[in-house]
Image (cartoon, rainbow, N blue to C red):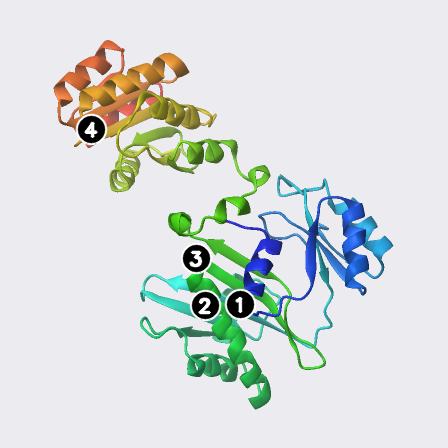
Amino acid sequence: MKIHEYQAREIMARYGLPVGGSDVATTPQEARAIAERVGRTVVVKAQVHVGGRGKAGGIKLAHTPAEAEAAAAAILGMEIKGLTVRKVMVAEAVDIAREFYLGIVMDRAARRVLMMASAEGGVEIETVAREKPEAIIRVAADPLLGLRDYHARQIAFGMGLPGPQALSFVPIATALYRCYVENDATLAEINPLVLTPAGEWRAVDSKILLDDSAISRHPDWPAYRDPDTEAPAEVEARAHDISYVKLDGEIGCMVNGAGLAMSTMDTIKLYGGAPANFLDIGGGARADKVAAALRIILSDPNVKAVLFNIFGGITRCDEVARGVVAALEEVKPTVPMVARLVGTNEVEGRAILAGARMLTATTMAEAAQKVVAVSRGGS
């Protein structure tokens, strides 16, 4: 789950991280009022879920409130990589002596929380990793004790910080670790983390990605969502409790169970097709949920065929089939459909779908071959 920079700053501020003064505006007049409150030079930054804002003209320096108002007027409404800017953050400008990168991710291969840092801040970490991999310091947190002070000192000395600056860096690193863990993040990043000429630390650009799977533990998270930056299909999927990820292929997939969905996509690829989505409809495939899933799949103009791959365990296959038929009557698709039902009452379920003039299959391989064929105009 992506959140805006101003929201990431709000979260980091709770942990004492030096994000500085800022606020969010939706009009040029609001931006001017914020700049007046700050009382010094500010930066006006577009709030959209994409990178490259500066290159696109979405970040501007303003020395006066009038300049902040003009900057906001220029940025609000502009498009950056297909997204319309509807909010800007107005933040206190910072004098920069040195720039650093500091971030935390999950290293799945090592099964550890990994802190990465570099004295090459202000540059995308992917670029640093590609061009100067030796410039990135990597330290894994202890799985039981977390990130300790000695871990943070190891990072600081690895970046070449002298003693006093290394000591002042330690509480920043440990606070970012707590922020990452306590907020169930998949990424917590400050780039750049700045040292001012006075020797003070400032978090100039903040980024946090949250793990959607933990939303039940965070009742405040729904307020972070920005519907203007999300695809309509993703919004509808979330409203119906459907796990959906759009892909680039031409075969829509409706499956119950994440593991089965992954296997389905792999099998489609094996027989020369390309899945258009990952979609896990979950258990108890009611007609309204099936219809919603089908609408989501068919909203993708690239979809040329749809594969239903349903395992009937607690849910009976004939009940699923009736839900599918009811959904077809509501949505009225124009692309061919292939269904594979396996489990309780599978024979009855396949008979119901065959009566609805759907192609049926008994194995995943057979279903994948059929849907690939019909997606190419075959039979």
Q: Amino acid at mark 3?
A: Thr
Q: Earlier in the sequence, mark 1 or mark 2?
A: 1
**Visible residue check, residue 333:** no
Name the residue that disc number 1 marks: 15
Q: Residue at x 36, y 12 (%)?
A: 329
Give me the C-alpha separation between circle 1 and circle 2: 8 Å
Callout 2: 10 Å neighbours few (<14), some, many (20+)? some
SS for callout 3: strand
Q: Amino acid at mark 4?
A: Thr
Cβ atoms at labels 1 and 2 below 8 Å apart: yes
Residue 329, placed above or below residue 159: above
Q: Earlier in the sequence, mark 2 or mark 4?
A: 2
SS for callout 1: loop
Name the residue that disc number 2 marks: 178
Q: Amino acid at mark 1?
A: Tyr
Q: Amino acid at mark 2?
A: Arg
Give me the C-alpha separation between circle 3 and circle 2: 13 Å
Give me the C-alpha separation between circle 1 and circle 3: 17 Å
Closest to the camera, between mark 4 and mark 1, is: 1
Q: Earlier in the sequence, mark 4 or mark 1?
A: 1
Cβ atoms at labels 3 and 2 below 8 Å apart: no
Percent x, y for residue 369?
25, 27
Residue 149, placed above or below residue 99: below
Q: Earlier in the sequence, mark 3 or mark 2?
A: 2
